[in-house]
Image (tube, helix red, strand yellow):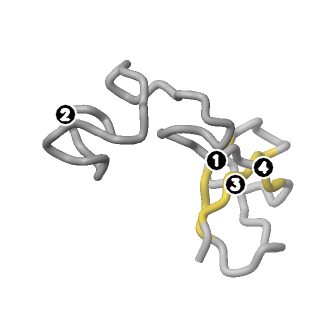
Amino acid sequence: MPLYEFHCSDCDTQFEELVFSHDELPACPKCGSTKTEKLISRPCRNRKGGSGAEIPTMTGQTSSGGGCAGCSGGSCATCGH
């Protein structure tokens, strides 16, 4: 089941919901309204971009794609790769 983001037109709330089909529109968890719409989410990237540009990591360092000597770029908490 994919997780989607939705917006409620009645109470202006944004929420996430697991849905069974791509066209299902769940009721708002705050007000119960069925006047909801699916939002388009932006994917998150945390490493070297497709254009070759360096993207800042969560530690504030820039990513070069290689990682530190301890992790070799495999999800390291020290260097952010």
Q: Quadrant of the N terminus?
A: bottom right
Residue 25 at x, y percent in the picture: 79, 66
Q: Please state which amino acid type lies under the numbered disc 2.
A: Thr
Q: Is residue 13 above or below residue 72?
A: above
How far is the residue under mark 2 from the one under mark 4? 33 Å
Residue under pointer 3: 28
Element type at mark 3: loop
* Numbered-mark total: 4
How far is the residue under mark 3 from the one under mark 4? 17 Å
Q: Nearer the viewer, mark 3 or mark 1?
A: 1
Q: Earlier in the sequence, mark 3 or mark 1?
A: 3
Residue 16 at x, y percent in the picture: 60, 54
Element type at mark 2: loop
Question: Label 3: few (<14), some or many (≥20) within 10 Å?
Answer: many
Tell whether 23 sits left or right of 48. right
The mark found on residue 43 in the picture is 1
Q: Earlier in the sequence, mark 2 or mark 1?
A: 1
Element type at mark 1: loop
Q: Please state which amino acid type lies under the numbered disc 4.
A: Ile
Residue 72 at x, y percent in the picture: 25, 48
Tell whether 48 sits left or right of 10. left
> Would you say the residues marked 3 and 2 are in contact, meaning their CB atoms lie under 8 Å apart?
no
Q: Please state which amino acid type lies under the numbered disc 3.
A: Cys
The mark found on residue 71 in the picture is none
Residue under pointer 4: 40
How far is the residue under mark 1 from the one under mark 4? 10 Å
Q: Earlier in the sequence, mark 2 or mark 4?
A: 4
Residue 35 at x, y percent in the picture: 86, 54
How far is the residue under mark 3 from the one under mark 1? 23 Å
The mark found on residue 78 in the picture is 2
Q: Nearer the viewer, mark 3 or mark 2?
A: 2
Question: Label 2: few (<14), some or many (≥20) within 10 Å?
Answer: few
